[in-house]
Image (spheres, grey):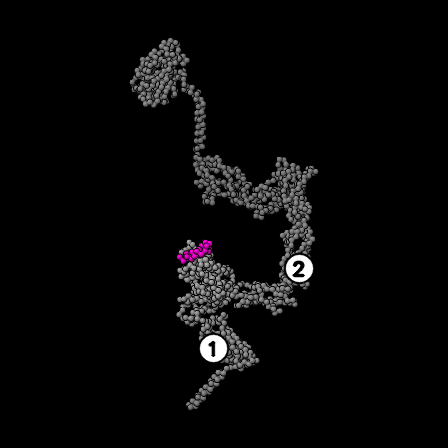
Amino acid sequence: MSRREGSLEDPQADSSISPLPHLEAKIHQTHSLARLLTKYAEQLLQEYVQHQGDPFGLPGFSPPRLPVAGLSAPAPGHAGLPAAERLQLDAGALSLLPPLLDVVRRHQAELNPRALRLLRRLEDAARQARALGAAVEAVLAALGAETRGPRPEPAVAAAAAAATDAGVFPAKVLGLRVCGLYREWVSRTEGDLGQLVPGGPA
Amino acid sequence: MALFSVFQTTFLLALLSLRTHQSEVLSEPLPWAPESLKVSINSTHQCLHLQWSVHNLAYHQELKMVFQIEISRIKTSNVIWVENYSTTVKGNQVLHWSWESKLPLECAKHFIRMRSAVDDATTPEQRFWSNWSSWEEVDVQNSLGHEPLFVFPKDKLVEEGSNVTICYVSRSQQNNISCYLEGVRMQGQQLDPNVSMFNLYDVAFIRETGTNIYCKVDRGDDIKGIVLFVSKILEEPKDFSCETRDFQTLSCTWDPGRDTGLLKQLPQSYTLFESFSGKKILCKHKSWCNWQVAPESQEMYNFTLTAENYLRKRSVHILFNLAHRVHPMAPFNVLFNDVSVTNATITWKVHSTGNYYTLLCQVELYGEGKVIQHNVSVKVNGELVLSGLQPDTEYSAQVRCANANHFWKWSEWTRQNFTTVEAAPSEAPDIWRNVKSVQGYCVVTLFWKPLTRLQANGEILFYNIVVKDLDRPSGLQLLSVPAPANRTELTLDQRSYQIHVTANNSVGTSPASVLVVSGDPGDEEVEEERVKGTEGGFSLSWKPQLGNITGYVVEWCDRPRDPPCDLQWKHLGPNTTSTVISSDAFRPGVRYNFRIYGISTEMVPHLLEKKTGYSQELAPSDNPRVVMSNLTSHSFTLSWKDYSTESQPSFIRGYHVYLKSKAGQCHPGSEKAVLSDDSVCCKYKIDDPKQKTFVVGNLQPESFYEFLVTPYSAVGEGPHGAFTKVTTPDEYSPMLIRIILPMIFCILLIMILCYLKSQWMKEKCYPDIPDPYKSSVLSLIKSKENPRLTIMNIKDCVPDTIEVVNKHEGTGKSPTEPEAAKPTYLYLLPAEESYSGPGPCICFENFTYNQAASDSASCGHVPVPTKAPSQLGLLTSSENLLTALEKNCMNSLEEIPAGESSLNYVSQVASPMSGEKSSLPTNPPQPELCSEYKMQMAIPLGLAAPSSSGSSSLSSITLLDEGEHYH
């Protein structure tokens, strides 16, 4: 917590034009975006599951939570990391998600061309993940923390596309996994930013 | 024995030699045996592909051969397929053969071998099988990789209703693996310790994204799955046809049938093949395709339409002559020329279809609710004269064309409208009148019906009315009423008038309608008859009229209850004596009145008959308002004079009077009736609807009754609403009233008279100043026949003193106190010591006079002396008066209220009798002139009973009240 507060103070010390309100506004704005995207991500997951059929909609169906193109779900120890580090992880994950979502969208367009709403949601999710990632990077920059450069998207997309070549069922599982990862990382980002918002949870 | 041994040895050697030769022959490859057998697999299609060549077949040689192929699964002895494949083999030809496995090839090892035989008539000696080739083993599992679990086949595409076999391959025998179809566990069959297969029968289409099948290791999270894409069966195209509209393009259309459900996974294509030209095109659309007509004027076309997807192919064929499939384009440039009152000419053009074709064109004319159809043969331009049209009428005409020689299809319609020219109205307006007499004038309301479109021939602008006085031919009255009015009112005198009515449009005038209005309609003498209506209307008939009748008119009102009543009429011919009047306005329960007029040749209407009736009678809806009167102990009268039978929903035939009583007995003239509420009552029936009073008799005194009067008609009676309650009075009350009332009246009269004559009565009976001549005392005296006694004249008495007695009320003092009553004497005469002058000498109290206010002291306030004065002796001689006096006083005292002041009139002569008189002048004047009157002097009661005898004492007590009681 003290680290987070220190991070908030640093830009203020470096700036002569009262950057604190600006930083707070940026954090608040990014947090709001993350909260909105969390809701959208949940809707996307539901929509995706609905179109794949059983067992994807069944509660007992739990395919292995394997990393996808190097992207894993937030680790259990994520909450214990310093704020800046958490946000860096968030930003990194958010930068990996758009190409994965694009791969899923392309596969669904082949498999399910009449599911226009699902395809639109996937397209929107990729764009929104990019926007949220950029916003987190901006917060990190404002906090004075280092930002990791984005991974090359073609490499990630190729890795994901290779997974879809294994068959339709693995591709469906991949899509489920990607949508799940998107929801988890957006939700995690919302939580991490929420801790930075003045008056937010400690 | 030795011979037998030698023979046996020889036989065995020969047999051995034969077997050796045979084995030598078989070990040599036969010519044309299969060789170089290679087996490959196609996992996607689950196919085994075999390729081989034929041994020793010359390059130029061509041989018809049979190849027997044997396939085993898991082990060579488990043969699952044997097939003879016949083909003609050329030299050095590599032969191919494929086999699709129902079980995914990855699920088990497969072994293949084959042998051949010549199946050619040219080499009959070679018709035996060659040796089997060696077994070729196909084992895909070796190339699967090292993943722990595999499920096959991958993403298979099948049609609905197919049977599918699925298997999994596990790398570990320890794993317990479960497989699921759409989340539901499947029961499988184990092929070997690592492989199980599952048979799915008659699979169904579930969704476009396929049916999900997966297997998982129970103790791990590894999941492997496949998607089975099930397609709906591709249908054969329906309604395949081709046609041309311009001889340049053939347009072919068809119904593709239902969707297969797999848009992306199983796309379907449509190809069009024409066999005569050998051309083939791939259609871009799934339901139509255009084909360019060959410029070399190909007449016949044989098309094959093929619908195809990965799983199935469907084809349909049509063969036709191009000239028989011409669908002309819609005509154009449709125009109307020379439009007149009844005619018009329509012209149109058609698109060119070559000079060899004649078109049949159809013209439809819509107007006045009719359709007239004309057929015209056309090469290029069409023309048709439309006749028999109605003036001023809008028509719509439409044209379409088709191939006249070989009909295929009509073109689309081309439509145009036109309106014919106006003409003068062709018919006279239908007129009628209503005549009312108002203050010596005839008020004629003239009605006419608007002309129909056919009659008007244009828009009616106004109506001209000419009123001609038949008595004065020169008297004309002209009137013009603008349309769309349908009535006008004329005020005429009592003469006869002829009325002409014409309708006018912009072109001319209609013929005139004529009607004569007579001063005396003479309508009152016709009796009304009843008619029975039906749903279809009223059937009216009348007696034919003798003489010159030009026709009849039936008149009625559509809304008789609502003024204006919407007068209607119907003209009928002179030979008609019946008609049916129907109207949409007729309602059940409404009485309609019909008047039938005969129209004379002079056009004068005469009322012939009146009819009245209902289209449908309804039960009376309300009951009369009944007034009850003449209520006696045995009867009462009911009256409903204001009930109108005319306004009822049916003809009233009479009334029912219901009477409820506790007794429940019905008297003669009534009958028992059970009402809807199961109550029982007596019903009186009145058959005459004009009888609107009824006397309910035979009632019991002091009894409670309820009655209801309801009308009835042919269809029922009125509602059984609330009954009116009545209680009959007792039997003697009227008699008592007859006696008591006059008595009360008489008493009142007497009392009034008494009041008015009270003064007279008082004077007569008890005057304030008694008349001695009328006194009873006088009669008593007279009875004693004492002639000396006379009556003093009041005029002779001069009063000198008035005694005023002041009595204190409620003082509580004992009446024995001397102050209780102190009379005060007012001396009316001067109190001179020597009274010498003449004058009245005494005043007296008359004890026979009883006056409530002033005389109360006549007895009680008489001063009672403590000792009897000696002068009382004057009265002793007349003791016989005491009784009468005492009686008077007693009566008086009974009525005198105690404690009142009184004014006593005391004679001066008698004054010394009282003790208080001592305060009076000691020498009161002695009235000498009136000495004789002392005998008439009032006698104080106290003095009258001075003795102590019981009777006297009783008399004294009785005379005085307690307050003034002296002892």
Q: Quadrant of the N terminus of chain B?
A: bottom left
Residue B761 or residue B854, whichever sits in front:
B854
What is the chief secondary structure element of the magenta stretch?
A: helix
Q: Label 1: few (<14), some or many (≥20) within 10 Å?
A: some
Residue B798 is at least partly visible in this image: yes
Q: List x then y, in percent, for residue A45.
A: 46, 60
What range is drawn magenta here? A1-28
Badge 1 and badge 2 in a common chain: yes
Which residue bears the numbered disc 2? B350
Q: Per the image, is B309 magenta?
A: no
Name the subunit of mark 1: B
User: Which circle marks residue B909 in the picture?
Assistant: none
Name the subunit of mark 2: B
- Which kind of residue does numbered mark 1 sit on? Trp
User: Which circle marks residue B135 in the picture?
Assistant: 1
Q: Label 2: few (<14), some or many (≥20) within 10 Å?
A: many
